[in-house]
Image: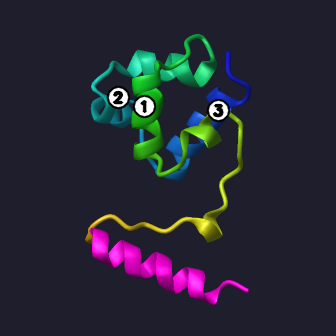
């Protein structure tokens, strides 16, 4: 079992106010499998782990315990064009000391 993964999955699900059934529908798995991930009875596959990271807007590194979520450093760039994202990155980099 991956350290703290079950706890993180439950905390993130609750943070996004999702039920296990809603998560299961998003991932195309059964609610009982979502429950088993949150209790530590099962470990998600690489594909499911990646899908969970997209769903919860966090990195797989965070889910695997390698890093913490730094909400100040996270930006939602969904809906932006590649040029807009590049311009945003350039703007941020120009503000760094």
Q: Which residue is mark 3?
A: 64
Q: Residues within 10 Å of mark 1 (few under 14, many from 20)?
A: some
Q: Residue at x 50, y 86 (%)?
A: 91
- In terms of sequence position, does the residue under pointer 3 or pointer 1 come before the other? 1
Disc nearest the viewer among 3 and 1: 3
Q: Which residue is mark 1?
A: 20
Closest to the observer, 38 or 80: 80
What number of labels is visible?
3
- How much space separates mark 1 and mark 2, taking CA atoms? 6 Å
Disc nearest the viewer among 1 and 2: 2
Membership of 37 in magenta stretch: no
Q: Is residue 80 visible?
A: no
Q: Residue at x 59, y 11 (%)?
A: 41
Residue 40 x %, y %: 63, 17
Q: Residues within 10 Å of mark 3 (few under 14, many from 20)?
A: some
Residue 13 x %, y %: 50, 42
- How much space separates mark 3 and mark 1, taking CA atoms? 20 Å
Tell me whether the residue at label 2 lies in contact with that at label 3, contact meaning CB atoms closer than 8 angstroms.
Answer: no
Tell me the quarter of the picture where residue 52 sits.
top left
Q: Residues within 10 Å of mark 2 (few under 14, many from 20)?
A: some
User: Over which residues does the magenta segment extend?
Assistant: 82-97
Would you say 48 lies left or right of 70 here?
left
Q: Residue at x 27, y 25 (%)?
A: 28
Magenta: predominant secondary structure element? helix
- How much space separates mark 2 and mark 3, taking CA atoms? 20 Å
- Mark 1: secondary structure: helix
Membership of 86 in magenta stretch: yes
Residue 31 x %, y %: 38, 22
Tell me whether the residue at label 1 lies in contact with that at label 2, contact meaning CB atoms closer than 8 angstroms.
Answer: yes
Q: Residue at x 40, y 25 (%)?
A: 47
């Amino acid at each position: 079992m991956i350290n703290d993964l079950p706890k993180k999955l439950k905390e993130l699900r609750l943070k996004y106010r999702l039920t296990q059934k809603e998560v299961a529908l998003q991932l195309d798995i059964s609610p009982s499998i979502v429950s088993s991930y949150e209790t530590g009875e099962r470990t998600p596959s690489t594909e499911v782990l990646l899908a969970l990271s997209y769903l919860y807007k966090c990195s797989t590194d965070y889910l695997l315990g390698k890093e913490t979520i730094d909400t100040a450093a996270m930006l939602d760039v969904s809906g932006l064009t590649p040029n807009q994202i590049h311009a945003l990155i350039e703007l941020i980099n120009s503000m760094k000391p």
